[in-house]
Amino acid sequence: MDRVERDTTNIRERLVQTTRASASSEENLLASAEQITRALANMPIVRHGSPDCDQALSDALRGLSFFTNLARIDANGRIACSARPAALGRSVATRAVFRRARQAGQFVLSDQVVSLVDHRPVILGMLPLTRNGNFDGVVAIAIDTRWLEYMVRAKRLPPNAVVAIFDTHRNIIAANNTVVARALFTRADAQNSGGTDLFTARDGIGRTWLYSTAALLGSRVYVGFAMPQSQLFGATYVHVGTDFVLPFIMIALTWIAIWMVTEQQVTRWIIYLRRVAAAYRSGHYALRPSLQDAPSEFRMLGDAMAEMVDAIQDRDHRLREALEQKSLLVREIHHRVKNNLQIVMSLLSLQAGRVADSAARDALMQARARINALALVHRTLHDIEELATVEIRTLLHDLAAQIHEGFALDSSALHIEIDSISRQVSGDLAVPLALFLVEALTNVFKHAYPDRADGGVIRVSLKPTDVGELSLTIADNGRGYVPEPAQASVGAKLMRTFALQLGGTVQMHTNKGQGTIVELIFPDPDRRASACPPVAAQALASPDTGLSVARS
C-alpha cells in the first residue's frame, strides 16, 4: 500500500509536470505574439495610426510565418490600419476579446474565432493602448491555429499520450489525436483547469484516461495532456503484484526445498526402516538395516533395531526350548494318565469277571467304557504334535470302534456309520463330548438290540447348524424305549450333565419299534473363538482394571 501511494503521487506529479512541459512551445508562441504587439505599440507610426502604418505592419508581418495579420484598431473597434489591406475598415467592436481588452488594460487572448480576411480559425491577441489616460484602441495580432496543430503533432510524446490545445468553450484547437481529445477535454471545466488538478475520463471505447490541464498565457487557451490509466499504473501493478506474489513464491520454493531435503534425508529412510520392520514382523530376523548413507539418527535407530532383533532371537530360542520341554512334560503326563486309566480298566475287567451278578457286571463294564473314553482322549493328546486340540472326527471313530469291541458284538450284525466334519477342539471340550458319546452308544448297545442285532445300524453324525452351532446326533433303528424310565436313568442324567458342560442341550426322540435319536446341540468352538477376543487382547484393552483373567 505504501508503494502504491508513492507511485500514485509520483505519477500525478510527473503528469502535471509533463503537461506544463508539453505546453512550453505553444506558450512561447503566444508570448511572442504579446511581445510583437508591445513592440508595434511603441512605434509612433502604429500607435498614432499614421498613413505609413499599413506599410509598417506589412513589413513586420513579412517575417512572421506563425501569424496571419497585424492591425491597429481604434477606440470604436474599426481597423484603422492593417498588414492585410482586405481588413481595413472592418469593425471588431462586437468581438468579446475587444471588450475584454478595453476593460482589462493588458494583453488578452480570444477563444478560437474565424478570421475576417481568410475565414480560417485563428486566435486573436489584443494589447490595449491609452492616450491621456483614455482608451485609444488596440494593437491586434492574429495567430494561425494551423501552426499550433503542427507544433502539437511534432512533439515527441510517450506512446498513446494525447496532447490538445482547447479554448474556454471546449473547442479543440489542435490535438495529436482529435477523436480521443474530443472525448476527454471537451468535458473539462475551464474554471478549474488552470491548477494542478487531475481528471479522469473515458474515451469512446471505454478506456480510462488520466489527464491534467494548464493555461497558456491567460485563461482563454489551455493545453491538456492525457495518458491511459493502465499504462500509467502498469509498473505500479507489477510492483504491487510482485510484492504480494514474491512471499508466496518464496514460501513455495522453501516448501519444495524442505520437501526435497526431507525426502532425501528423512522420508526414504523411514520407508526403508518400515520395510525392515515388516520383514522382522514376518520372522526374517537375518536381515540387518544398511544405513551407511543415512543421517546419524537413523543409523542409531538401525543399530537399536538390530540389537532388538538379536534380543528377540535369543528370547525366541529360549522360548522354543522351554516350549519343547513343556510339550515333552505334557505329553508324558498324558501318557502316564492314559496308562493309569488302562490299569484301572484292567482292574475293572478283572473285577467284572469275578462278579456273578449281571447288573453289577454291567455297571462295571459301563464304568470301564467311560474310563476308556477318558484314556482315548489322553492317548489322542499324547499322539499329536499340537497338545492343545483334538481332531474330533478321529476321536468319534476311535470311540465308536472301542465301544463296539468292548461290548463284544458281532461286527457283521451291527454297523456303526460315522459322518462327521473335520474340526479341531480343545481337550476341555473333547472330554465331555467323548463321555457323552460313550453314554449314548452304551445305551444303544444295551437297550436298542436286546435279542438280535441283525440289520442294526447306528448312525453317528456331527454337523453344523444354520445358527452357528454343532449338532451331534446318535440314531439307531432298534426297538426304542418307554420315555419315563429312560429319562430317569443314570445315563440320561449324565448326558444332560455333559451337555451342560459343553454349553448345549440334549434332546431324545424315540418311538417303540422305530429306534431312538439322541441329539446334542452345543456352540461351535470356532464361532465362539472368533466372537470372543483373546484374554491377552482383553487385558490390553483395559490396562487399568487391575484384574487377572484365569482360564476356565
Image (spheres, rainbow, N blue to C red):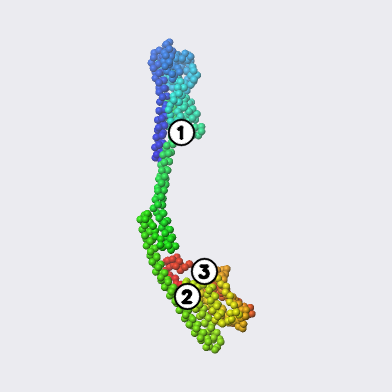
**Dot 1: what SS?**
strand
Neighbour tally class for label 1: few under 14, some 14-19, many 20 plus, Cα within 10 Å: many
Residue under label 3:
526
Cα separation between marks 1 and 3: 86 Å
| Residue 476, x across and y down, in percent | 60, 77
Which comes sooner in the sequence, label 1 or label 2?
1
Look at label 3 and name its amino acid: Asp
Residue shown at the point (47%, 75%) measured from the top left? 382
Residue shown at the point (41%, 56%) measured from the top left? 272
Q: Are marks 3 and 2 in contact (CB under 8 Å)?
A: no
| Residue 369, x across and y down, in percent | 53, 81
Look at label 2 and name its amino acid: His
Look at label 1 and name its amino acid: Pro
Which comes sooner in the sequence, label 3 or label 2?
2
Query: In the displayed structure, does residue 289 sit left or right of residue 86?
Result: left
Which comes sooner in the sequence, label 1 or label 3?
1
Residue shown at the point (53%, 76%) measured from the top left? 398
Residue under label 2:
382
